[in-house]
C-alpha cells in the first residue's frame, strides 16, 4: 500500500511541474521582451503600454505596444505608438508603427 501512495504522490508532483514555467521564468521573459523591444523602438522616451501579449508556443511570438514620442523634427515630438513582435526562438524584436486612431 505504501508503494501505491508513493507512486500516486510522485505522479501528482510530476504532473504539477509539467503545467508550465515558474513565475520567475515568466518575469524573466517579460523583462527580456521589454528590454529587447525598447532597444528596437525608434521612439524617444519609449515605454511599454501594458504587458506583453503571449501567443501560443507554436506561433513563437510575444507582442508588446510601445509608446513614446517621434524624434523627427518635422513631427514636433508628437506621441506615437509602435507594435513590437518579439521572436521567442531568435530572441529578436521587430517593430512597426501602430496607428491607434479610427480608420
Image (cartoon, grey):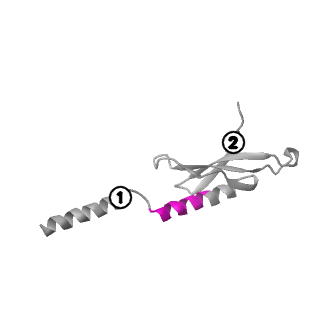
Q: Which residues are magenta?
A: 22-33
Left or right of 87: which side holds 1?
A: left
Q: Residue at x 69, y 46 (%)?
A: 82
> Quick one: label 1, few (<14), some, or many (20+) residues within 10 Å?
few
Q: Position of residue 75 (x, y in %)?
A: 84, 45
Which mark, residue 33? none
Q: Residue at x 53, y 54 (%)?
A: 88
Which mark, residue 18? 1
* 15 is within the stretch colored magenta: no
> Quick one: label 2, few (<14), some, or many (20+) residues within 10 Å?
some
What element does badge 2 sit on?
A: loop
Give the image quarter of residue 19: bottom left
| Disc 2 target residue | 98
**How far apart are the alpha carbons under marks 2 and 1?**
36 Å
Placement of 10 over or under 66, stated as above or below: below
* 25 is within the stretch colored magenta: yes
Amino acid at each position: 500500500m505504501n508503494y501505491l501512495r508513493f507512486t500516486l504522490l510522485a505522479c501528482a508532483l510530476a504532473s504539477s511541474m509539467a503545467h508550465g514555467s515558474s513565475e520567475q521564468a515568466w518575469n524573466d521573459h517579460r523583462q527580456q521582451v521589454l528590454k529587447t523591444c525598447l532597444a528596437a523602438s525608434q521612439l524617444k522616451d519609449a515605454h511599454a503600454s501594458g504587458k506583453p501579449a503571449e501567443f501560443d508556443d507554436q506561433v513563437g511570438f510575444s507582442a508588446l505596444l510601445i509608446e513614446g514620442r517621434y524624434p523627427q523634427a518635422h513631427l514636433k515630438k508628437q506621441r506615437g505608438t509602435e507594435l513590437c513582435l518579439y521572436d521567442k526562438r531568435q530572441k529578436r524584436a521587430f517593430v512597426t508603427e501602430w496607428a491607434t486612431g479610427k480608420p
